[in-house]
Amino acid sequence: MTSYRICVPASSANLGPAFDSAGIALELYLTLEVEEQSAWEFVHTSDLLPACSPYEAHYIYQIAEKTANLYQKPLPPCKATVTSEIPLARGLGSSASAVIAGIELANQQCDLNLTTHDMLKLGTAVEGHPDNVAAALLGGMVISTAFEEEVKHVQLALPELEAVLSIPSFELKTEAARNVLPSQFSREMATMASSISNVFIAALASGDLELAGEMMEQDLFHEPYRSSLLPHYEKVRQEAKLAGSLGTVISGAGPTMLSFARKGEGLALATHLQGILPDFQVALTHIAKHGLQTETLRPATD
Ligand SMILES: Nc1ncnc2c1ncn2[C@@H]1O[C@H](COP(=O)(O)OP(=O)(O)O)[C@@H](O)[C@H]1O
Ligand SMILES: N[C@@H](CCOP(=O)(O)O)C(=O)O
């Protein structure tokens, strides 16, 4: 009997001004251990996961089935034991990780031989933006764009940064946080917002972390609108700066805030933030080098 493990990292999208485009993978994981079985079964071993029955309502199953249908293949049943370290609806890409896990489940179960690019396009079509899925698939820091049904991406060298997450106890669905954004920007505003984003990415790519940190906090595309949904927004930015952070942004659509620290300085920053945010979960994490990884646990014996 074949069995395998699918492991997908969390992700933080936007990084401030690179809205719907930049993403980093984070060392928090969604894991599926999959065994052949004659009927579908999902077993959840973590209380961070939503209810898992009936299996037809499971988001990962729905994505797997959609992917199999797209390639006109039947989806053989299995037992999937799911574990997650990614809090839901906190701006840490839980849905993107579930989407990539679902696509990979279909890929394995139906022998689809999907390429990374195929998976990036499929995941982007489901999510509506490529930033989280690109980071969850490829790992590290990925800059991407989706247009005319194509997705293009560039993976940047891993920056020498640690990430401190200030995670509030309340959920904010991405859809709700997208609904507060304006549907149009004036030419002046779009030019200003994209030039800030350009300098931010160029600073990251050239290793100028001070400038990247400065630009990171100047977003005009989404943070000015979403900050009203986050009562902790100004406090976290100010306190993180006082404690030496390079820059603090809304992680994805929020409500988590992500503060970058230079290598070796993350723990002191996390300790400071936990002290002023006793009701939050403050976590020091690192950029995950690898994205989706699938490992055979027991190969087929016949
Ligand atoms: N591992 C998972 N299994 C099933 N559904 C999931 C999983 N992870 C996320 N989801 C679904 O995605 C929703 C959260 O998605 P979203 O609002 O985009 O927030 P985020 O991706 O920032 O965590 C959850 O409420 C749940 O419906
Ligand atoms: N670019 C998207 C990213 C959403 O990320 P999530 O982790 O909150 O799902 C957006 O800002 O809406």
Image: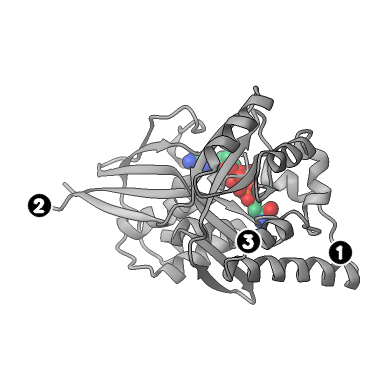
Mark 3 C-beta to ligand 2 under 8 Å: yes
Residue 180 makes an appearance in the image: no
Which residue is found at the position 58% from the left and 70% from the top?
205
Q: How far apart in space, not on screen, are marks 3 and 2 (Cα)?
A: 40 Å
Mark closest to the chain's N terminus, 3 or 2: 3
| Front one among 158 and 13 | 158
Query: Type of residue at label 3?
Result: His
Q: Amino acid at mark 2?
A: Thr
Does residue 199 appear in the picture of this structure?
yes
Instruction: State yes or no: Cβ of the residue under disc 2 lies below 8 Å from any atom of ligand 1.
Output: no
Frontmost residue, 198 versus 299: 198
Left or right: where 72 falls relative to 279: left
Residue 301: image tag: 2
SS at circle 3 = loop
Mark 3 sits on what residue? 129
In percent of the image, x 65 and y 55: which residue is there? 15
Residue neighbourhood size for the residue with mark 1, other residues' Cα within 10 Å, grouped as few (<14), some (14–19), many (≥20): few
Residue contact at pointers 3 and 1, CB within 8 angstroms: no
Of badges 2 and 1, nearer the viewer stands 1
Residue 53 falls left or right of residue 175: left
- Looking at the figure, which quarter contains the C terminus? bottom left
> Neighbour class for label 2 at 10 Å: few (<14), some, many (≥20)?
few
Task: Provide the residue designation for mark 1.
Answer: 184
| Image spot of residue 143 (x, y percent) | 58, 67
**Crowd band around label 3 with a 10 angstrom C-alpha radius: few (<14), some (14–19), many (20+):** many
Pick whichever of labels 2 and 1 is earlier in the sequence.
1
Tell me whether the residue at label 2 lies in contact with that at label 1, contact meaning CB atoms closer than 8 angstroms. no
**N-term-proximal mark, 3 vs 1:** 3
Residue at far left of view: 302
Please tell me in which quadrant of the rendered image residue 211 appears: bottom right
